[in-house]
Amino acid sequence: MADKRGTRRAIRRLEEIKTWQLVILLVMASFISATFLRLNNIGMIERRDAVINADKEGDEGTLERRVYDLQRYVVAHMNADPGRIALEHSYKRAYEAAWKEFESKSASRSSNDTVAKVRQVCDARAQAGGWGRFYATADPRYVSCINDEWAKYPAASSLDLKFTPPSTAPYYQTFVPPLWSSDLAGWSLVVTGVIMLIIIARLVALAVLKLLLRYRQKPL
């Protein structure tokens, strides 16, 4: 009899807090978590846009600071994956600088219009073949065309000079956010998870206690 009373008392205590009350708390906590996760993402977008704008402006010092700000933010906040950021304008400037260097060296040992002729041929082929624009992308077909056409001139053999575009790897930035971060978004998710576990544990405990009470009420 004492066991039955103890079981009923445990059931009443568990039933003092209603399931619907816990569900309301869960919904509220989920909404708060979603809000903080969204704010983390917005913070990342703002810093990523700052990187893109600095890349367009061409100030290397500002760009370096903006990239560092983005990196520091991403590694400290969940739900802040910026994806793969292409520093397109910085690469264009580096590409054009490499081309001007090649043009200057080749012009010093050949006629001034040699490079212009080479480029004219390759531009026509690129347009016919639908290749990327010369100064915007390091299209290997265009680079190969430039070097092949340049090799046809006598100055090429004496200079041992080829056009080599800069590598694209340094002009891509990728940062990985943590799966969980100790900020408002992370801790609100912890609270949400705890409430969910409480709901599940309460339902399981009630089911077990009621089954136990029913078993003890059966006549021997």
Image: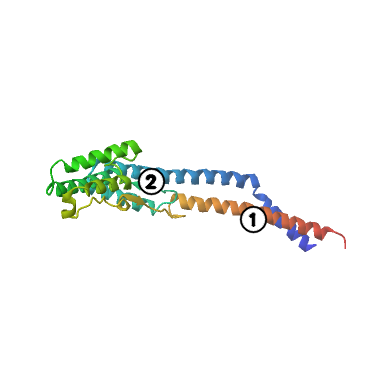
Task: Say how the picture is coloured.
Answer: rainbow
Which amino acid is tagged 2? Answer: Met
- Left or right of 30 in this view: 136: left
| Mark 2 vs mark 1: in front | 2
- Left or right of 205 in this view: 2: right
Q: Which comes before the other along the chain, label 2 or label 1? A: 2
Disc ID at residue 44: 2
Q: Which residue is drawn at 73% across and 60% down?
A: 6
- Secondary structure of residue under mark 1: helix
**Residue 178 position within the rendered picture, expressed as x and y whole percent measured from the top left:** 43, 55
Q: Distance between the residues labelled 2 and 1?
A: 37 Å
- The quadrant of the rendering that contains the N terminus is bottom right
Residue position marked by numbered label 1 in the rendering: 201
Give the mark count. Answer: 2
Q: Which residue is drawn at 22% across and 52% down?
A: 162
- The quadrant of the rendering that contains the C terminus is bottom right
Q: Residue at x 33, y 40 (%)?
A: 132
Which amino acid is tagged 1? Answer: Ala
- Residue situated in front as seen by the camera: 51 or 140: 140
